[in-house]
Image (spheres, helix red, strand yellow):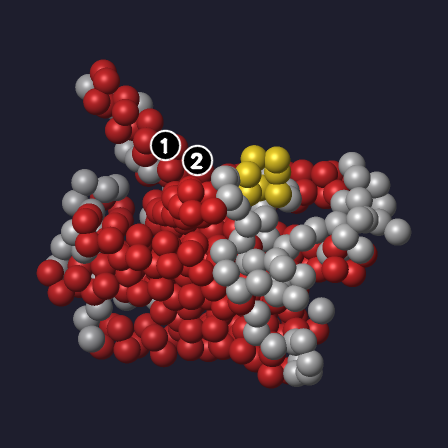
């Protein structure tokens, strides 16, 4: 438990302290946000606000994770494959987002990487993560990921064995990662909205991963009802704690009126980290519940596009849906706080589902 606290506290303090320095450097270099011309007119005043703040989130997460291991050395307490793969996915997608943000700034436009280049970058990182997650067996034969579709734990839906099953899993993992990364990216349209929601989901995964560690089959015995088979739950909880602290510290400066934006650098990194954690904790579909706000934002865009193509009419004033409420007359801070409430309710419901499923197996004894 100490290592989890060290990770969260270290990344929190580092993010709070380093972000102002990042703001000064980015402003001096003229790395300011471009604003959509068709967006709410109130956002035009945000043009030029320093962006690419996601670099701070990634750096603080990595340092927080490292600090936790320095503070708790010892046999069997070193970095694990599951945690390192999640950090690889987070950093890799953050790099893709960084390139996207950089091109926006250099070209002075609201669109960065071309869609094919962005898709290619996300694909390379996501597929590499998925392939590697099926390797690195521990002494019990467990790999960071399994060829099984999971909700609260592995289900009975198993991809075929061999190369076919591995390929299907890689495709499934890629869809999960891309959907989550782009869901967070779509949510990042108001000051602090995405970072605040991410804090809540990462917090949920701190609880879930640590609970899995305390009730793991390795400790309780493989035959114990309700035990969890996740490979490295304690180390994954450290990653989640570090990411939570980093987002919390960043939110201090990203809250309305934002002094800095995370950009695609941060939103893609956060989405990748969440998807990676869901995969290695065997809670893939539970992420849909925990990240309910991200799902709502994504679905609103899909419905807007589909509705316009079918009827030539828009369902919302503007998508993602947070802009719909802005154009309907809601003050930005009202939208943010109410959407945070939605995010919190989704997280609370997801944790309730997780715990209820555990109780359904009876106490582990």
Q: Which residue is mark 2?
A: 296
Q: Residue at x 28, y 78 (%)?
A: 25
Q: Which residue is mark 1?
A: 300
**Number of residues whose C-alpha sits closer than 10 Å to that of mark 1, classed few (under 14), some (14–19) or many (20 or more):** many
Residue at the farthest front position: 162
* Place of residue 167 in the rendered image (x, y in percent of width and height, measured from the top left): 40, 46
Q: How many marks?
A: 2
Q: Is residue 326 above or below residue 8?
A: above
Q: Is residue 11 above or below residue 247?
A: below
Q: Which mark is residue 241?
A: none
Q: Residue at x 39, y 66 (%)?
A: 91
Q: Residue at x 18, y 59 (%)?
A: 104
Please indicate, yes or no, whether residue 217 appears anywhere in the rendered image: yes
- The residue lying toward the viewer, choosing from 272 and 313, is 272
Residue at the farthest top position: 311
Q: Is residue 305 above or below residue 135?
A: above
Q: Secondary structure at mark 2?
A: helix
* Place of residue 60 in the rendered image (x, y in percent of width and height, measured from the top left): 47, 73
* Place of residue 47 in the rendered image (x, y in percent of width and height, measured from the top left): 22, 57
């Amino acid at each position: 438990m100490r290592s989890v606290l060290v990770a969260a506290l270290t990344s929190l303090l580092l993010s709070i302290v380093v972000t102002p320095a990042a703001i000064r450097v980015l402003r001096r270099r003229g790395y300011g946000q471009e604003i959509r011309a068709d967006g709410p007119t109130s956002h035009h005043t945000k043009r030029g606000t320093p962006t690419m703040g996601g670099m701070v989130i990634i750096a603080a997460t990595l340092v927080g994770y490292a600090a936790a291991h320095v503070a708790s050395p010892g046999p069997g307490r070193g970095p694990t494959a599951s945690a390192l793969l999640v950090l690889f996915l987070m950093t890799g997608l953050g790099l893709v987002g960084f390139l996207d943000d950089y091109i926006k700034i250099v070209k002075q436009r609201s669109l960065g990487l071309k869609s094919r280049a962005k898709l290619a970058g996300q694909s390379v990182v996501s597929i590499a993560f998925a392939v590697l997650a099926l390797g690195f067996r521990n002494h019990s034969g467990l790999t960071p990921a399994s060829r099984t579709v999971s909700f609260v734990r592995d289900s009975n839906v198993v991809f075929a064995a061999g190369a076919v099953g591995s390929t299907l899993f890689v495709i499934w993992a890629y869809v999960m990662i891309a959907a989550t990364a782009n869901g967070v990216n779509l949510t990042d349209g108001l000051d602090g909205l995405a970072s605040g929601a991410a804090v809540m989901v990462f917090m949920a995964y701190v609880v879930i991963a640590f609970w899995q560690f305390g009730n793991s089959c390795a400790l309780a015995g493989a035959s114990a009802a309700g035990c969890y088979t996740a490979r490295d739950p304690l180390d994954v909880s450290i990653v989640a704690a570090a990411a939570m602290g980093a987002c919390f510290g960043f939110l201090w400066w990203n809250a309305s009126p934002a002094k800095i934006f995370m950009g695609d650098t941060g939103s893609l990194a956060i989405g990748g980290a969440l998807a990676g954690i869901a995969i290695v904790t065997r809670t893939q579909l539970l992420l849909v519940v925990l990240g309910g706000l991200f799902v709502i934002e994504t679905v609103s865009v899909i419905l807007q596009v589909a509705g316009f193509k079918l009827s030539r009419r828009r369902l919302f004033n503007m998508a993602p849906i947070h802009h719909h409420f802005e154009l309907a007359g809601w003050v930005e801070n009202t939208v943010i706080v109410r959407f945070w409430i939605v995010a919190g309710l989704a997280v609370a419901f997801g944790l309730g589902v997780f715990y209820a499923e555990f109780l359904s197996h009876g106490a582990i004894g």
